[in-house]
């Protein structure tokens, strides 16, 4: 049975912004595993004051699609 992927939301990020944090930063790693080679980390910082303008890019369901 294949379970459909759930579309990403910004609910968690907006909840942090609503708690009064001025900056919300998301991180993601990519690589072949800790034993198989190099790994890279990406980060995106969002200003909480812009939370109403944040959007998930259309068609993106996974960070690897970025």
Image: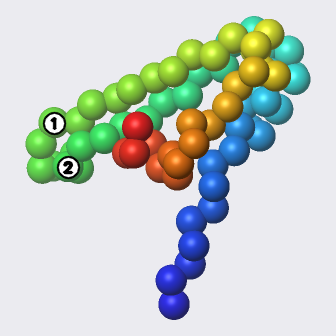
Left or right of residue 42, residue 14 in this image:
right
Between the residue at mark 2 and the residue at mark 1, the CA separation in whole angstroms equals 7 Å
User: In the image shown, does 21 or 4 lie closer to the viewer?
Assistant: 4
Task: Tell me which residue sits at (45%, 43%) in the image.
Answer: 63
User: In the image shown, does 46 or 56 lie closer to the viewer?
Assistant: 56
Q: Which mark is residue 32?
A: 2
Identify whether 13 is placed above or below 19. Answer: below
Q: Quadrant of the C terminus?
A: top left
Asked whether the beta carbons under mark 2 and mark 1 sit within 8 Å of each other, the answer is yes
Task: Tell me which residue sits at (51%, 46%) in the image.
Answer: 60
Number of residues whose C-alpha sits closer than 10 Å to that of mark 1, classed few (under 14), some (14–19) or many (20 or more): few
First in sequence: mark 2 vs mark 1: 2
Number of residues whose C-alpha sits closer than 10 Å to that of mark 2, classed few (under 14), some (14–19) or many (20 or more): few
User: In the image shown, does 30 or 63 lie closer to the viewer?
Assistant: 63
Task: Tell me which residue sits at (39%, 26%) in the image.
Answer: 42
Instruction: Point out residue 7 in the picture as x, y percentages from the top left corner.
Output: 63, 55
Identify whether 59 is placed above or below 15. Answer: below
- Quarter holding residue 52: top right
Label 2 residue SS: loop
Residue linked to disc 1? 38
């Amino acid at each position: 049975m294949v379970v459909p992927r759930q579309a990403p939301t910004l609910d968690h990020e907006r909840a942090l912004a609503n708690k009064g944090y001025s900056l919300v930063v998301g991180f993601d790693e990519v690589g072949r595993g800790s034993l198989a080679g190099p790994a890279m980390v990406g980060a995106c910082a969002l200003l909480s004051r812009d939370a109403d303008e944040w959007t998930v890019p259309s068609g993106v369901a996974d960070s690897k699609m970025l």
